Each structure stands twice: as C-alpha cells, then as structure tokens.
Amino acid sequence: MQPTVVMKFGGTSVADAQKIRRAAARIVAQREAGRRVVAVLSARGHTTDELIAAALEVSAHPDPREMDMLLSTGERISCALCAMAINDLGHRAISLTGSQAGIVTDTSHTRARIIDVRADRIRKALEEDMIVLVAGFQGVSTSRDVTTLGRGGSDTTAVALAAAVSAEVCEIYTDVDGVYSADPRIVPDARKLPVVSFEEMLEMAASGAKVLQLRSVEYARTHGVRIHCRSSFSDATGTVVVGEEETMENPLITAVTHTTEEALITLSGVPDRPGAAAAIFTALAEAGVNVDTIVQNEPKGEGVQAEVSFTLAADDLHAAETALGPVATELGISGIALDEQVGKVSIIGAGMRSHPGVAAKVFQVLAEEEINIEIIHTSPIKITCLIREDAVPAAVLALHTAFGLGGGEQELPIGQQSR
Ligand code: ASP
Ligand code: MG
C-alpha cells in the first residue's frame, strides 16, 4: 500500500487564489510522488477573526452553538476552493467537512475536544485514488451539532487524522519555516531547530510558541504522530517534532519562549483552611477558565490569611472575574487584584532535567538586566519567570544570548560537549 501523508495548510498559506493554487500544486506533487494525501486546510487569511467580529456586531454574547455553525464555514470555503484547483490539475479531489470526515467531539462548543475519528469515508476515498481535503478546526458533537476546536484547532484536526489513517508524517505548512530558538522578531539571530521532542514542544506551545496548537502536540505525543513544521513557500526542511528517543542529543537549552497575552489575578485574605483553594478553582473550572501557574502563599502564624495568585489567558479575565465574585463573598476573600501588564519568559530544554545551575543562571541573567521576577514556576524541562510585560523583549534577548542559542554553537551539557 502507498504511504499516506497528511498536509495541513494554515490561513496565510491559502489566503488568496494564487496561494490556494500553490497549495493545490504542492498537494498534487506529493500525490504524484506516490503518496496518498489527506490535506487539512485552515480558513483563509483573517476569515475566522472576521466571522467573530461579524457575530459580535449582531450579538454581545453570541450563542456558542451558532458561533460554531458560523466559524466552521471558513475552513469549508478553503477546502472547496482547493478541491476545485486540484481537479483542474487533473487529479480527483473531494472536500469534506469535519463532520463528513468523521471527527467526533465532545459537546463543548467553541473549544471542543476530539473524542473519536471515524475515518472510513476518508479511507474509502483514498482507496479510490482521490485526494481528500478536510475542513480543519471542526467536528460533530456526540449530540450531532457542529463544533469547533478552539483557535489554531486545524493543527489538531491534522494530527488526529494522521493518527487515524496511520500517516507516515503530519506536515504543517505555514508562513514560517519551522520552530525557532526564540521569536525572530525579538531575537535576530534565533536559530531554526531541526528537531524538537514532543515534551519540549509541549512546553513551548504552552508558554507562548505559536507554531502549533498545544492540543495538537498533546495528541501527537499520545498517538506517536511525527510532525514536520515547514514553510509553504519553500521546499526547505523545517522542524521535525518526534519522541525523545529519536532526538539525537539533548541540548541543555533548546529555546526561549514568551507570551504577553497572560494576566495575573491575586486574591488576598484567603482563609487558611482546607477547601479554600478547591472552592476557588472549582468555580473557575466551571466557568471554563484555564488557569496556568498557581502560587499560594501561606504565611505562618495563628489566624493568618493566605494569598493566592494565578495566571490565565488575558481573554479569560472577564469570565474569571465573574466566576470569582460569589466564591470571594462565600469565603470572605478580602481582595481581588487583576493585572494585565504581565508577561512570561520561559527557557526550555530536555537537557536541563539532569543539570543543576540552569535556574541560577536564568535569575542571574535577568538580574543583570535589572528585571524583577514576580513569580517563578518550573517543570523538569522548563523555567518560567513572570515579569512586567514591557521587560519581555529584553529578557528574551538576554537569555537567548546567555545560553548561546543563536546561529552558532549550542551549549551542551557537560559530558556531551566533545563528541
Ligand atoms: N481558523 C481557525 C483559527 O483561526 C483555526 C485554525 O486556523 O487552525 O483559529
Ligand atoms: Mg496556526
């Protein structure tokens, strides 16, 4: 049987007629090279943003089910147009909605999760020598409504389909040529990374790298789907995301990521007793607010109250504030402070797992830049510092330089230095 490849094209790669034709030509080239092709397309250009704006023009709080009916159209347009272009190149193509493609999700509108992929229709079309185009970012819920998968969700569609049809690779075509050691707009000598492990990519996607939707990386890791992030405008090899056993060596540090799209909430006067944190975070979870770093400070002493801080997406600030009102009253919390002027800078590398001193160096570098660290959060392969938003570019640049991530040699852990 011929190998199968999944090719996903992002919004900028299908933005106009010429780009759609170019994507069609790339798809056809893969087919002619002897591979079966499933292509997943995003909505063209700013279509999704425009659809959201259109909804907000008619309703302050659009009904989530109708929102999904609306948003799912963007990807359908791209797929139908691309199928037409492929047909003109002498191949047979069929476009499918997420629902027709068998992507089954839970019922949480606008942020649904894929729970099953029933790919028999895709398999049959592939067997009939067709190129299959699937509208990204959408599915059908267990109660038969159209759902969408959250911003950037086409990546997850692509990975899920790659797993379902046992594709040899899931190619993500985009307007950048891979995953970089830092945002090249901040760090001019940022390096394209040839290989990144799932674990590193997960941390990177969670801490601000925008190349892949976080869920797509989770899905790829769980199902062992090999991802290749590459440019739709060149043939150059991009970045391959694979299991750690396949990455040749673990550099000490792989990348510096950042985000300024976070906000910080600090609750003061939280009663120091069992159940307080549970009540707070249950209320937030029920409101669908995704909380990131949580810090609880519990000063010692009789009757002293605790302070709880946590970060969240700035977009969720309003929902969080609303959800916290009743719990705050119930628990007698004395203050809720909202702060949008925060940013996060993170340093990621599988090699730091076994090497002490990385954290100390990070703090030293930021100290030399006179950047104050407000919250520190670590995982075995990541160190994140919450700082003022306006200090983020300087922090990213300084860390990238200090850890030698630029164009030249990378810093390897002791023992891997000479090979
Ligand atoms: N069109 C959707 C978005 O803009 C999904 C995607 O492009 O992956 O978020
Ligand atoms: Mg994207």
Image (tube, rainbow, N blue to C red):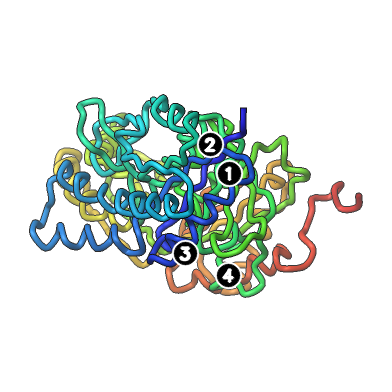
Q: Which residue in the structure is indicated by mark 3?
A: 387
Position of 71 relative to 186 (above/below): above
Position of 166 relative to 203 (above/below): above
Locate residue 286 relative to residue 255 in the image: left or right: left
**Residue at image point 45% right, 64% down:** 19
Q: Which residue in the structure is indicated by mark 1?
A: 227
Q: Earlier in the sequence, mark 1 or mark 4?
A: 4
Locate residue 117 relative to residue 203 in the image: left or right: left
Q: Earlier in the sequence, mark 4 or mark 2?
A: 4
Label 4 amino acid? Pro
Query: Mark 2 and mark 1 in contact (Cβ < 8 Å)?
Result: yes
SS at mark 1?
strand
**Residue at image point 56% right, 40% down:** 5
Label 2 amino acid? Ala
Q: Earlier in the sequence, mark 4 or mark 3?
A: 4
Distance, label 4 to label 2, CA atoms, is 26 Å
The answer to whether residue 312 is seen in the rendering is: no
SS at mark 4?
loop
Distance, label 4 to label 3, CA atoms, is 20 Å
Residues 419 and 1: in front is 1
Distance, label 3 to label 2, CA atoms, is 31 Å
SS at mark 2?
helix
Q: Is mark 2 within 8 Å of ligand 2?
A: no
Q: Position of residue 116 (x, y in %)?
A: 38, 26
Classify 10 Å Cα crowding around label 2: few (below 14), some (14-19), many (20 and above).
many
Position of 218 relative to 71 (above/below): above
Residues 340 and 407: in front is 407
Mark nearer the viewer, 4 or 3: 4
Q: Which residue in the structure is indicated by mark 4?
A: 184
Mark nearer the viewer, 4 or 2: 2
